[in-house]
Amino acid sequence: MPFFKLFTPISYWLLIALWSCIFIFYVRRIISKKVEGKLFSTLVIILAIDAFRTLFESVYFGAWYTSLVGFIPKSIHDMLVRPELVFIPKFLNVIAAVLIIFIVIRHLVPEEEAERERQITYLKKLEKEIHERKQAKREREDYIAKLQTALKEIKTLRGILPLCSYCKKIRNDKGYWEQVDKYITQYSQADISHCICPECMKKHYPEYVNRQAED
């Protein structure tokens, strides 16, 4: 028997086996509800419809050509070749196409739009979160910079200050002796305001003190 005469029925029955597996896979996914998301569920239903259509057509024409080869009774071919039966796979193709178009218009397109809106909303939320994090990072960096600047500007007097017992000058880090007011101004944030204490006022300006007492 020529190879090409056998190839057609063999290819049809191979297609039948493959599309049976595909169709069963889709049906099991739908029944078990393992498909996540309405959009993906709708796609699986469409694929299951197309798989059933292809499987039925493969079985019909597979039996047709297998009967022609002689592997099954010739009467099967004579039956399948009748116009009222040939109409069945063609009609099934039309029904499947109409059903798929209906599902696409009724469910798939709205689900795609809803999914697109969800993605846009998620992206906007993500962009907002990224912007807030960048803003918080900038504020934190500015705060750290201000703290570092403040630390650089802070001057404190620490440790033991060598003070002359007579002239009251202070020895600085370089070994030079400076007036107390100059030293404090240089190494702290304090400003010096000169005045006279009551004891020194009595000692150096007694007449002024006496005048105030008389008044």
Image: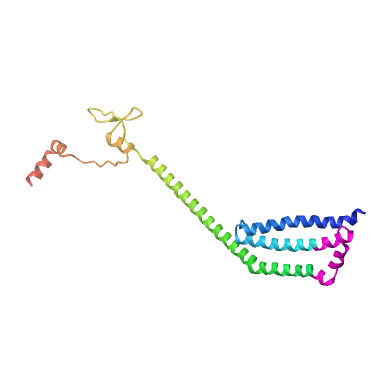
Taking the spot 70% from the left edge, 63% from the top edge, the residue there is 49
Magenta stretch holds residue 64: yes
Q: Is residue 181 left or right of residue 69?
A: left
Taking the spot 87% from the left edge, 65% from the top edge, the residue there is 75
**Residue 194 placed where, x, y %?**
23, 41
Taking the spot 78% from the left edge, 57% from the top edge, the residue there is 16
Snapshot quadrant of residue 207 = top left
Region of the chain picked out in magenta, as a range: 60-87
Q: Name the residue nearer the viewer: 187 or 198.
A: 187
**Residue 53 placed where, x, y %?**
75, 64
Magenta stretch holds residue 78: yes
Q: Residue lying furthest left in this view? A: 214
Q: Is residue 44 left or right of residue 131?
A: right
**Residue 22 placed where, x, y %?**
72, 56
Q: Is residue 151 left or right of residue 168?
A: right
Q: Quadrant of the N terminus?
A: bottom right
Taking the spot 78% from the left edge, 69% from the top edge, the residue there is 88
